[in-house]
Amino acid sequence: MRDASEPGALPTPGGPRVRLLDADSAPLLVRDHFAGGDPGPIVASLAQVPELVGPTLPFLGAVLGPSWIPLREKEIVILRTSAVMGCRYCTDTHTVVALDSGLGRDEVRALRGDLPVAGAFSDAYERALISWCDAVAFGIESDIRPARAALDADDARVVELTLLVATTVMLNRYATALGLPVSVDARARLAEEAL
């Protein structure tokens, strides 16, 4: 079992609420996910129930992985959704990913709620995308209709973006409920960026 106090993970207040398995403690059915080293806290926690790893990881890979929606746009969705849902793990982890995918520091701060969105994003589509994330994450019908009207995108794009928001909300709840720890590397990068 990996202890959240070991290198690679920063403990959450009170620590993780489930054991994070390592290669030695993982069931045989999921050990291949540990072959390359630490698979991260989502896999290390999910490994507790090996029969869920098979369907869950490909689904997450399909939704969160490469698609015809650019990485910058996906990271706007993931980081904004995580921030408005209050998921420390996902917000901190995806702040680093967002910076690495080309978002500027002020854009990242706006997505995290530290700056006004309008001041950091000049592109009307990106502002509408952020409004869409907020509306879908909170699920308020009266906010969803005008946000959809402002989002100038075809139906296929809206479906994929909505599934991305919804999947992020699911992961936010998972990571928050289980108190998943943010990696030491991500924390160091956040400190370096003063975020």
Image: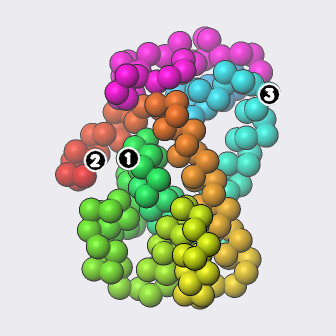
Instruction: Identify the residue position indicated by label 1 in the image.
Output: 92
User: Splitting the image into 4 quarters, where does residue 8 fall?
Assistant: top left
Mark 3 packing: few (<14 Cα in 10 Å), some, or many (20+)? few
- The answer to whether residue 161 is left or right of residue 89 is right
In this rendering, the answer to whether 19 lies above or below 172 is above
Secondary structure state at the residue bearing disc 2: helix
Contact? badges 2 and 1 (CB < 8 Å): yes
The answer to whether residue 142 is magenta is no
- The answer to whether residue 131 is left or right of residue 153 is left
* Mark 2 residue type: Leu
Mark 1 packing: few (<14 Cα in 10 Å), some, or many (20+)? many
Magenta span covers which residues?
1-30
Contact? badges 3 and 1 (CB < 8 Å): no
Report the front residue among 99 and 117. 117
* Mark 3 residue type: Glu
**Is residue 32 among what the camera can see?**
yes
Secondary structure state at the residue bearing disc 3: helix
Nearer-N-terminus badge (2/3)? 3
Instruction: Identify the residue position indicated by label 3 in the image.
Output: 51
Contact? badges 2 and 3 (CB < 8 Å): no
- Residue 33 is labelled as none
> At 52% from the left edge and 34% from the top edge, which residue is drawn?
177
User: Splitting the image into 4 quarters, where does residue 171 fall?
Assistant: top right
Front of the two marks 2 and 3: 3
User: Splitting the image into 4 quarters, where does residue 84 fall?
Assistant: bottom left
> At 39% from the left edge and 34% from the top edge, which residue is drawn?
183
Instruction: Identify the residue position indicated by label 2 in the image.
Output: 190
Calculate the distance from the C-alpha at mark 3 to the C-alpha at mark 1.
29 Å
Percent position of residue 109, x then y:
29, 63
